[in-house]
Amino acid sequence: MRHREKAASCESSTRAQRRVLVVDDEDLIRRLYVRALDRRYEADGAASGTEALSLLEASNYDVVVSDVALPDLNGIELLKKAHEQDADLPVVLVTGAPHVETAIEAVDYGAFRYLVKPVDLNELRRTVDKAVQRRELARFRDQAMTLLGERHRQQSVRTALEEQFGLALDGLYMLYQPIVHAESGEVFAYEALVRSHNPELSHPAALIDAAERLGQVWMLGRRVRARVAYDMGFMSGVEKVFVNVHPAELLDDALYEETAALAPFAHRVVLEITERARLAKIKDLEARVERLRRLGFRLAIDDLGSGYSGLTSVVSLEPSFVKVDMSLVRDIETKPKTQRLLQSILDLGREIGLDVILEGVETLEERSALLNLGAELLQGYLFGRPAPFDLPSTFDVVPSNAGLSPASLTLAQAPGQ
Ligand code: G
Ligand code: MN
């Protein structure tokens, strides 16, 4: 049974949430101690060692004040058992018959203090205050250790990621996917798509995510552009290459350097930009874009209609191209409303001199529906998957029979693999 022996105190205390358990078989003394402590703490009483133990199991106390001489389990036993449960719990032992042996034992088992009866109540309070402080310090130390452990863990995750990212940069290469003239299938340009030989970060999404986490987006972009420039040195008969640019790269001075690897090819390079939300945060965006144009680069708005890019960016950036996201292309032959939307994008493009590229074309049905809408530039698996550089110049889509599927297509020249 739990003895609630609260004093009828109306004094409010900031420490009311700290809890003290007073263990003494003498009712008067126990109540006296409880009352002395109840002004500052929530104090409970227990009349025996076993009762105290069951209270300690049932709830959390911050300090135990216990008589040494108890009828069943004595104070030293209680101290030992309490510390088995919670090694940091301060236990103050009180005795009417001080013996050197018990004092030594109490110290051996880690009692917080050893008080002799009659206990001065002020001394009791001071002792419990100190014990509570000790308890709080122990808690603080535990939290600090947990935090340190967590930080250590995060640090090693970061180190592992840095290592993988470094390997990924070392094994960086580009694949090229054709953008074709809708009617003739002739290659108009290639989009460069980054990959890595490091299997941990082989795909762009993982690679870019790692770069963002490590604050290495600029580094990744520089490597990509250098790699594309290197490849372009070997491309003959390829007029244009589209290169994806992360919005954060627009803040990298290296992008604007006339001595940069890609600068000599600028007139054949179209930079694809996406993510309206992030672009909006770049204050001098238009000035930066203008600098790129002066270097000879042209711009494409990527993923129009995907929710990332909107028509406002189209207008403010004065791009040369807009790439319509594949979500608007998928099964277009069955979607009259989407056809109307694409129709107006294509019309707008013609009106303001903007070339519209439709991405992700996978079937002949999609291709002919897009042709009917007047689309001129298409990209997608139907014409070629991203492939290593060894580039054919045309992709003639020659249906071998009626009822075609992409698998039955004959490509005049398969992209070199
Ligand atoms: O965001 P961006 O448009 O740059 O992404 C191009 C991605 O789309 C590339 O990873 C490329 O592999 C993929 N892709 C290109 N053509 C097709 C296609 O026809 N179908 C599908 N599902 N994905 C494509
Ligand atoms: Mn793209």
Image (cartoon, rainbow, N blue to C red):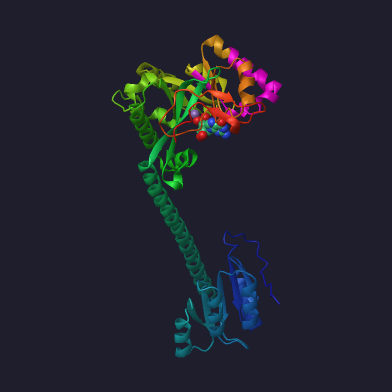
The residue drawn where x is 37% and y is 30% is 228
Q: Which span of residues is magenta-colored? A: 321-347
Left or right of residue 261, residue 141 in this image: right
Left or right of residue 220, residue 186 in this image: right
Q: Relative to 46, say whether 176 is above or below.
A: above
The residue drawn where x is 60% and y is 23% is 367
Residue lying furthest left: 259
Residue 198 seen in the figure? yes
Q: Relative to 161, say whether 282 is above or below.
A: above
Q: Quadrant of residue 328?
A: top right
Residue 117 seen in the figure? no
Q: Quadrant of residue 389?
A: top left
Q: Quadrant of the N terminus?
A: bottom right
Q: Quadrant of the C terminus?
A: top left
Q: Nearer the viewer, residue 296 or 65?
A: 296
The residue drawn where x is 61% and y is 80% is 29
